[in-house]
Image: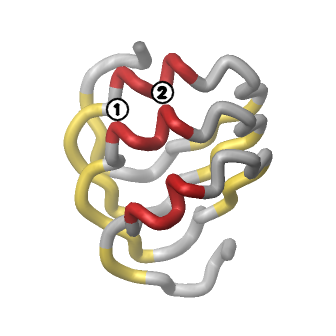
Amino acid sequence: LLANWISGSLTSDIFKLTSIQELHLGSNSLSSSIPSEIGLLSNLERLRLNQNSFTSTIPSSIANLSSLRELNMAHNYLSGTLP
C-alpha cells in the first residue's frame, strides 16, 4: 500500500493480521498517533511508515516486535526515543 495517498489513521483491523511479515505504508497521508496495538504484529519483519503525518511518541509496544529487522519512520512528526 506504498504511495497510495491513503489518509486518516491506522484502522484497528490491520492489527488482526498477526501473521503479516511486512507492512509498507510509506508515502501516504496517514495521521494521528501510531496505535500501541502495533506490538501485536509479532511476526513483523519490516515496518515502513515513512513519509506520513504521524504525531506523538513511538509506542513502547514496538519493542514487542522481536522479529523486526527493518524499521523506517522517517519524515513524520514523531517525538521521543525508540523503546
* Left or right placement of residue 2 versus residue 49 in this view: right
Q: Foreground: 65 or 4?
A: 65
Amino acid type shown at disc 1: Ile
In front: label 1 or label 2: 2
Q: Residue at x 33, y 30 (%)?
A: 59
Give the amino acid at mark 2.
Ile
Q: Residue at the location (39% across, 62% down)?
A: 12
Return the residue at label 2: 62
In percent of width and height, residue 14 lies at: 53, 62
Residue at the bottom extreme?
A: 5
Q: Which label sits on residue 83?
A: none
Query: In this figure, which residue is indicated by the disc labeled 1?
Result: 58
Check contact, mark 1 vs mark 2: CB within 8 A.
yes
Left or right: where 25 falls relative to 15: right
Q: Quadrant of residue 7?
A: bottom left
Residue 52 sits above or below residue 46 on the image:
below
Q: Residues within 10 Å of mark 2 (few under 14, many from 20)?
A: many
Q: Nearer the viewer, residue 52 or 44?
A: 44
What's the CA distance linking mark 1 and mark 2? 8 Å
